[in-house]
Amino acid sequence: MAFDRLIENIIKMQNPTVAGLDPKLDYVPASIKENCFARHGKTLDGAAEALFEFNKALIDALCDIVPAVKPQAAYYEMYGWQGVKALCDTIAYAKSKGMFVITDGKRNDIGTTMEAYAAAHLGTTDILGKNIEAFGADALTVNGYLGTDGIKPLINICKEKDKGIFVLVKTSNPGSGELQDIKLETGQTVYEHMGKMCEFWGKETYGKYGYSAAGAVVGATYPEQLKELRTKLSHTFFLVPGYGAQGGGAEDVKNAFDKNGLGAVINSSRGIMCAWKKQGLSKEDFAAAARSEAIRMRDEIISTIGEIKL
Amino acid sequence: MAFDRLIENIIKMQNPTVAGLDPKLDYVPASIKENCFARHGKTLDGAAEALFEFNKALIDALCDIVPAVKPQAAYYEMYGWQGVKALCDTIAYAKSKGMFVITDGKRNDIGTTMEAYAAAHLGTTDILGKNIEAFGADALTVNGYLGTDGIKPLINICKEKDKGIFVLVKTSNPGSGELQDIKLETGQTVYEHMGKMCEFWGKETYGKYGYSAAGAVVGATYPEQLKELRTKLSHTFFLVPGYGAQGGGAEDVKNAFDKNGLGAVINSSRGIMCAWKKQGLSKEDFAAAARSEAIRMRDEIISTIGEIKL
């Protein structure tokens, strides 16, 4: 199962974190932008090339210390199909550097359409008998509002191609409780129900370390719920956003881990991409600043949870 | 408001339907494929060009009788960034023919990221002071699982740019009830709660005909729920999938409309794209077959609901 590979990366690097690649043109330093816009003019092509150059520098700076990256589809779609090409190139580049790639697309649809998303992001597309990877990530974030038939096609691809999914359970945003915290007739909350669906969806996909291919997104900004869900969802691997720019710290996220320090990967996006700001450096130093922030984050989490072991 | 434009198209054509553009390479006839693959080889480029040619022929065959199209993002992403370029080109072509374009992406995320999706699909992206439309649809389908802060950025763009959204409320798939039909402590179902959130999200965006910019997706396959929601959500315009290939008929969808025959648009995707099959024609006749199926569907619905008037 795909999360076995992620877990092995995490243990090797003693670092349970993922770097979010949510690039905006504003974050890209002048030296990169000038070149790209000189070649392409003020176009989406120029912007997309600048994003890819920015991402490559981040990946180069992080790939030996951070086990995974999480590009967020929205920030690429914002730059049109050219931006989506940059997403595609970023995934390929990160994989070539040994990183585990989680495409954060929060995709969701009915079964037949979900087959298309599963093929797009995790599987292959048949072009007259030739199977081509369209995006080729290792894992995809998804939304389970449509129920089992919207998730099943993904599980099939996960089994077949050694991939994983993360289903939104309790998200990190301030308004997540509006629907997710509501109590059902049964006394369970909506997020708890969704969490249990993850355990159900994952049940034929356990990997070597006890975690299934159906992970869950649980925000660092809700540490109590993280703790509750870690206890209740023993086979569900967590992707935890909300650390750093959204306010979560190491104490908040420690509840995401099992007793061995496994079971979760903590995301930081702006905290890493824009670390130069906090460090009082120039934007041109973004890659070195990202590396030192990634090291600081790793050390902070490891000093809270201890050595990660099997 | 965007739905005013859609409503005016519907009244003018006396046709409350939308043609789903969910092209698979399998649907495309040999005459188109041969040309495209001769130019590009067995590549995603060849496939994407074939999809766009297929879509253009459908749009040409439908644009004077069908008011809107709904390209489904998954079927384009399946063909990589090249497929996403075909989505982009399809949107532009349909708009050039006067059609209202609903991008079916079911996007969802936290506020800051939703700003990026809103810019991508409905707004513009700032490239060094130049505002460029990345995709430029008239409306986008979205998933409200994350609550108000994931929807607000869309509403802002809807107001500013005269656009609309459709929030998933009760979806057409067999398993939609697993989460959506569950009763909350309050006695409401999850879908009913989501429907009321649509009314709340739309409340400052009423258009000329009483409908807000925050529409809802409600499946034709659940006619009782359609009826219930039509009564309860008086300012919410409905996008109704599930007609045709998924099993819904005119009797099922009539509950989606208000007393004037307004308030909803009914989608058919495979039913129109693959109409040649049912009509016993050759795949090469897909465009003419799509047109006659679209006419049949229009006539069937209008004969059930009567003339659409203000």
Image (cartoon, coloured by chain):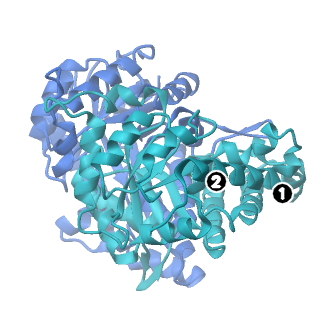
Chain colours: A cyan, B blue
Quarter location, residue A86: bottom right
Q: Earlier in the sequence, mark 2 or mark 1?
A: 1
Please say whether residue A94 is visible from this viewpoint.
yes
**Location of residue B68 by image quarter:** top left
Q: Viewer-nearest of labels 2 and 1?
A: 2
The residue sitting at 20% across, 19% down in the picture is B232
Q: Is residue B194 left or right of residue B155?
A: left
Label 2, residues with CA under 10 Å away: few <14, some 14-19, many ≥20: many
- How far apart are labels 2 and 1 at the CA level? 33 Å
Residue B74: horizontal and vertical position, in percent?
A: 42, 58
Residue A91 vs residue B242, the one in the foreground: A91
Above or below A134: residue B110? above
* Residue A9 placement (x, y as % from top left): 55, 69
Residue A298's label in the rendered image is 2
Q: Which residue is mark 1?
A: A36
Looking at the image, residue B254 sits to the left or right of residue B98; the answer is left
Cβ atoms at labels 2 and 1 below 8 Å apart: no
Q: Regarding mark 2 in the picture, which secondary structure is present there? A: helix
Residues marked 2 and 1, same chain:
yes
Residue at 40%, 21% in the rendered image: B201
Front residue of B115/B257: it is B115
Label 1: element kind: helix
Tell me which amino acid carries mark 2.
Answer: Arg
Dot 1: chain letter: A
Residue B88: image location, x then y, percent: 56, 53
Q: Position of residue B142 (x, y in %)?
A: 41, 39
Amino acid type at image mark 1? Cys
Chain ID for label 2?
A
Q: Is residue A212 above or below residue A44?
A: below
In the depicted structure, whether residue A241 falls above or below residue B80: above
Q: Is residue A106 above or below residue B41?
A: above
Q: How many marks?
A: 2
